[in-house]
Image: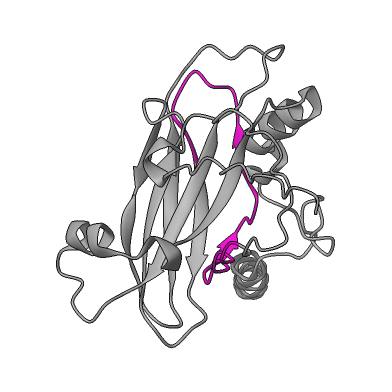
Amino acid sequence: MPRMGTGVAEAVVTVETWGREPPTPPAPIPMASASRAPTKPQQILVLDPPTELKFRGPFTTVVTTHLKLRNPTARKVCFKVKSTSPRRYCVRPNSGVVEPGCTVTVAAMLQPFSYDPSREAKHKFMVQTVFAPPDTSNLQAVWKKADPGELMDSKLRCVFEMPRESDKLDDGLRLRKPAHLNKPRLDSSTSLKPSRTTPLPVVLLVIGAVFVGFFLGKFIL
């Protein structure tokens, strides 16, 4: 009978070492009796955006982008956010609990740095989740006791974008307040010519002068 090949165990990468890419293990030799590895549970939270976090420059100040975590289930879900470059980002909140049917907005703040368009950014974020136990008062203890087979995760890559020249011009036009908005608008029915209608006091004065002249002329005659 032909000899059966020997299987090669694959390297297991824990979450704590997620920030570094492990070396690619050699392809395992198929075995007739080899059992399939358990499938990892699918992410239960709905991420928006789902795969990319876009940061728009210039990067001379803190640039913030937002990630929404929506829980469509009837159970509480614990989450935590990790980054391959923790010194470059400030994440708030970086962990917490998403109530059933609710949404949590996470702010990822990129610290100022010298951006080089020729260099490709390889920054990534990972959202790790697990169904919450009855007691979530100590999240650190929850994660320590969590079963690795029940952990769910999603990875998002970071994309850096510089504003285009047309975008800069549009932003400048929005900031400049149109001059014509400050001037009072004339109604089309309003005439710019002085009114020809004689004011009422002038009419009264003319009538009075006529009566006075009439009486004076009568006495003189």
Residue furthest bottom in the image: 74
The part of the image, by quadrant, that contains residue 199 is: bottom right
The number of numbered badges drawn on the structure is: 0
Depth check: give the residue in front, 129 or 65.
129
Depth check: give the residue in front, 15 or 51.
15
Residue at horizontal 63 percent and vertical 64 percent from the top: 36
The part of the image, by quadrant, that contains residue 25 is: top right
Q: Which residues are magenta?
A: 37-64
The part of the image, by quadrant, that contains residue 211 is: bottom right
Residue 42 is one of the magenta-drawn residues:
yes
- Residue 129 position in % (x across, y down): 42, 63
Residue at horizontal 53 percent and vertical 21 percent from the top: 59
Which corner quadrant holds the N terminus?
A: bottom right
Which corner quadrant holds the C terminus?
A: bottom right
Left or right: 117 with respect to 75?
right
Left or right: 104 with respect to 66?
left
Left or right: 107 with respect to 45?
left
- Magenta stretch secondary structure, dominant: loop
Q: Is residue 16 above or below residue 115?
A: below
Residue 91 is one of the magenta-drawn residues:
no
Residue at horizontal 21 percent and vertical 71 percent from the top: 136
Residue furthest front in the image: 1
